[in-house]
Image: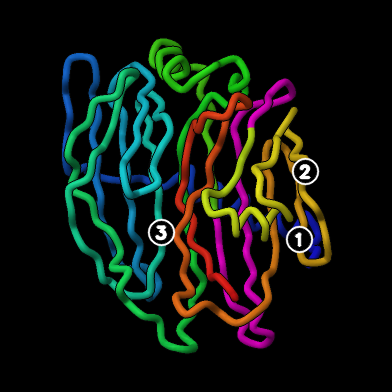
C-alpha cells in the first residue's frame, strides 16, 4: 500500500492546518486559583452529515499548564494563551454526559468536569462504516524528553519555562474499502520546531494497532526526527517530512462483531513515562 510521499504530505498538511487553526470558541467553565487560570469545554455539533465530539482546555495564564482529562484521552500540556483539544467524529448524535476528573498543574489537583461521551451501545448496521476520524492538538517538550526522569519533573519545568513546549498536531483515520473490504488506517502527525537532538517514543495503548502500524507490539523510537523500528511491507509504510510523519497500513479479515475499537496514541519519554496522549478509533478485524 505504498504511496508517494507528496500525496501523503499534502493530505497531512491540510489536516495539520485545520488542527492548528481550529478555535474551541466560547468556553463553558473557568478555573481561577491564583496559580492557574484556564477554562474547559466538552461539546458536540453536526458537520457534513456527521457529528463532532470535542474536549478542549484553554490556558489563560502565562505559565505552562499540564492537563489530563479522564476518559477523553486528552493528556499533555497547554501553552500560555493556547488551547489543547481532542476531537472524534461519529455517525449518530448519541452522546451521554457524566462528571469526570480533569487534572491540572505541576502537582496535579482535579476538578469534576462535565464530559460528553459517545454511547458505545450503538450497533453499526452493515454498510454503515463511515470513515473514523480523530483530530487532536496538544503541546509537549518532545525535544527535551530525554532530559527528564519522570513526569513530575517535566511538569515543574514546563510550568516555569513554557517556551520549551512544541505543538503536536495529529490526525488518525480508519476506513473500510467498499470494493475490497480491506481496512485502511492512516496516522499522521506534525511537531513544531527542530528535532535533531530529540529522542522519544510513540505507541498505541492497544497493541493490536502497534502490530498493524509497526509490525510488532512495542512502541517505536523517534530519534533526531527519524522513526525507527517499523517493519515496512506492501501493507505497511512510513513517510517522513520536515518534523512530520505519516504511517499507513491495511488489515485484512472480517470486521469484528463490535468493529469500532477506542484506544489512544501515546508519546513516551525514553525513560518510559507517558508525556501526552491523543484518542484513536479504528475498525478492528478478526
User: What's the magenta region?
Assistant: 172-200
- Residue underneath mark 1: 236
Q: Nearer the viewer, residue 260 or 271?
A: 271
Query: In the structure shown, which secondary structural element does the residue marked by tag 1 occupy?
Result: strand
* Mark 2 Cα shell of 10 Å, populated few (<14), some (14-19), many (≥20): few
- Residue underneath mark 2: 229
Q: Which residue is drawn at 61% across and 85% down?
A: 178
Is residue 17 something that shows in the picture? no
Quadrant position of the N terminus in the picture: bottom right
Q: Which residue is drawn at 35% across and 49% down?
A: 72
- Residue underneath mark 3: 88
How far from the left and from the top, in percent, is residue 120? Answer: 32, 69
Query: In the structure shown, which secondary structural element does the residue marked by tag 2 occupy?
Result: loop
Numbered disc in front, either 1 or 3: 1
Q: In this view, does 215 lie to the left or right of 59?
A: right
Instruction: Determine if the magenta segment contains residue 275.
Output: no
Instruction: Determine if the magenta segment contains residue 192.
Output: yes
Query: In the structure shown, which secondary structural element does the residue marked by tag 3 occupy?
Result: strand
Amino acid at each position: 500500500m505504498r504511496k508517494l510521499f507528496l500525496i501523503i504530505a499534502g493530505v497531512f498538511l491540510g489536516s495539520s492546518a485545520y488542527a492548528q487553526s481550529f478555535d474551541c470558541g466560547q468556553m463553558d467553565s473557568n478555573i481561577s486559583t491564583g496559580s492557574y487560570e484556564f477554562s474547559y469545554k466538552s461539546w458536540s455539533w453536526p458537520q457534513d452529515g456527521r457529528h463532532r465530539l470535542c474536549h478542549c482546555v484553554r490556558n489563560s495564564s502565562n505559565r505552562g499548564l499540564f492537563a489530563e482529562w479522564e476518559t477523553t484521552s486528552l493528556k499533555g500540556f497547554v501553552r500560555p494563551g493556547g488551547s489543547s483539544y481532542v476531537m472524534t467524529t461519529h455517525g449518530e448524535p448519541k452522546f451521554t454526559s457524566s462528571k469526570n476528573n480533569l487534572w491540572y498543574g505541576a502537582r496535579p489537583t482535579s476538578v469534576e468536569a462535565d464530559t460528553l461521551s459517545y454511547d458505545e451501545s450503538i450497533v453499526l448496521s452493515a454498510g454503515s462504516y463511515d470513515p473514523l476520524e480523530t483530530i487532536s492538538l496538544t503541546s509537549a517538550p518532545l525535544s527535551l524528553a530525554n532530559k527528564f526522569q519522570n513526569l513530575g519533573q517535566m511538569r515543574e519545568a514546563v510550568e516555569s519555562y513554557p517556551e520549551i513546549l512544541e505543538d503536536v498536531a495529529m490526525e488518525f483515520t480508519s476506513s473500510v474499502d467498499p470494493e475490497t473490504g480491506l481496512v485502511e488506517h492512516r496516522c499522521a502527525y506534525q511537531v513544531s520546531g527542530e528535532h535533531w537532538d530529540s529522542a522519544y517514543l510513540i505507541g498505541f495503548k492497544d497493541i493490536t494497532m502497534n502490530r498493524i502500524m509497526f509490525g510488532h507490539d512495542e512502541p517505536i523510537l523517534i530519534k533526531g526526527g527519524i522513526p525507527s523500528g517499523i517493519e515496512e511491507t506492501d501493507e505497511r509504510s512510513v513517510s517522513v517530512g520536515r518534523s512530520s510523519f505519516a504511517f499507513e497500513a491495511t488489515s485484512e479479515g472480517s470486521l469484528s462483531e463490535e468493529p469500532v475499537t477506542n484506544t489512544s496514541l501515546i508519546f513516551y519519554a525514553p525513560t518510559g513515562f507517558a508525556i501526552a496522549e491523543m484518542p484513536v478509533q479504528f475498525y478492528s478485524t478478526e
